[in-house]
Image (tube, rainbow, N blue to C red):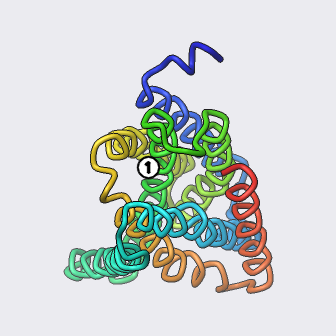
Amino acid sequence: MNWFENLNPAIQALLATIFTWGITALGSLTVCFFKEVNRKVLNTILGFSAGVMVAASFWSLLAPAIELSEELGYIAWLLPALGFTIGGLFVLLSDKFLDKVLKGRTNLRSAASLKKSILLISAITIHNIPEGMAIGVAFGGIASGTPGMSLVAALMLAVGIGIQNFPEGAAVSLPLRSEGFSRFKSFMYGQASGLVEPIAAVIGVVLVLTVRSVLPFLLAFAAGAMIAVAARELLPESIQENKNLATVGLIAGFVLMMVLDVALG
C-alpha cells in the first residue's frame, strides 16, 4: 500500500477510476447473457440507476458544494443554486439540440430511436463526469491537506462509485440491444460511457489543487445535470411497463448510494 501512497495524486485518481471504468465494463457485459432484453430487468435497472443518481446528486455533490461555499466565505446557497440550475438547463438544451439535428430525417421512427440511443449514452456519460471528478477531488484534497480527507476514504469512495457503475453499464448496453444494436456494439458503447471518469478524475485533482474557489459551482452543475437526466430519461423509461419494479429499483438505488456516501464518504 505504501507504493500507492507515494504516487502523485493525479496517478492515484487515474488508477482508482480505471477500476470504476472496469466495473462499468462488467455491467455492460450483461448484454452477452440475454438473447432478448427482459423488460422487467431493464425497468428495475433503470429505476436503480435513477435512485443512485438522485442520492449521489445530494450526498456526493450538492451537500459538499454548500459546505464548501460556506468554508470559502460565499453565500452558502448562491453558487450551488446557480450551478444546479445551469446543469439542469444544460441537459434540456442538449435534448433540444438533438431534436434539431435529427429533424431532417425522413424516417421519423428511426430518428426517434436514434435520438433515444444517443441520449441514453450521453446521459450516463454525463453522469460519469462528476463521479470521476468527485474521486479526483478526494485524492486532490488529500494532497492539499484538506481536513477530514484520508486515503482510505478516497479509496472507499472509488469502491462505492464502482459498485453503482455496474448497473449503469447494463443500463446503457441492454437498451441499446433492444434498439437493434449488436451485442458487441452494445457492450462497446456501454463500457465507453465510463471512459470519461479517468479523464474527469485528473481534471478534479487539478481543480482542487489550483482553482478550488469554483468547485461549489462545478459540483452543483453536475448535480443539476444528474437530476435532469434521471427525471427526463431514466424514470419515464423505467415506468413504461412496470411501475412497481421501477419504484423498487429506485428505492434500492437511492438507499444503497445513501448508505455508501454516508458510511464510506
Q: Is residue 196 above or below residue 152?
A: below
Figure quadrant of the N terminus: top right
Question: Is residue 236 shown to the viewer in this render?
Answer: yes
- Residue in the foreground of this view, choosing between 185 and 259: 259
According to the picture, the residue beneath numbered tag 1 turns out to be: 133
Residue 164: x and y in percent read 66, 54
Instruction: Please tell me in which quadrant of the rendered image residue 23 appears.
Output: top right
**On screen, 72 above or below 238?**
above
Q: Using the rendered view, name the quadrant where residue 217 is placed.
A: bottom left
Instruction: Tell me which residue sits at (69%, 61%) in the image.
Output: 257
What residue is shown at x 62% (from left), y 14% (from top)? Answer: 2
Image location of residue 106, percent across then percent down: 25, 81
Tell me the SS state at disc 1.
Answer: helix
- Of residues 188 and 104, the one nearer the viewer is 188
Which amino acid type corresponds to the residue marked 1 in the rendered image? Met
Looking at the image, the residue that sits furthest to the front is 73
Left or right: residue 182 compared with residue 211: right
Q: Could you tell me if residue 117 is visible in this image?
A: no
Residue at 52% of width from left, 34% of height from top?
Answer: 18
* The furthest residue to the top: 3
Q: Which residue is located at x 61 percent, y 42 percent?
A: 158
Q: Position of residue 95 (x, y in %)?
A: 33, 78
Total of numbered circles in the picture? 1
Crowding at mark 1 (Cα within 10 Å: few <14, some 14-19, many 20+): many
2 up-or-down from 28: above or below: above
Tell me residue 230's x, y (percent): 54, 75
Position above or below: 77 against 198:
below
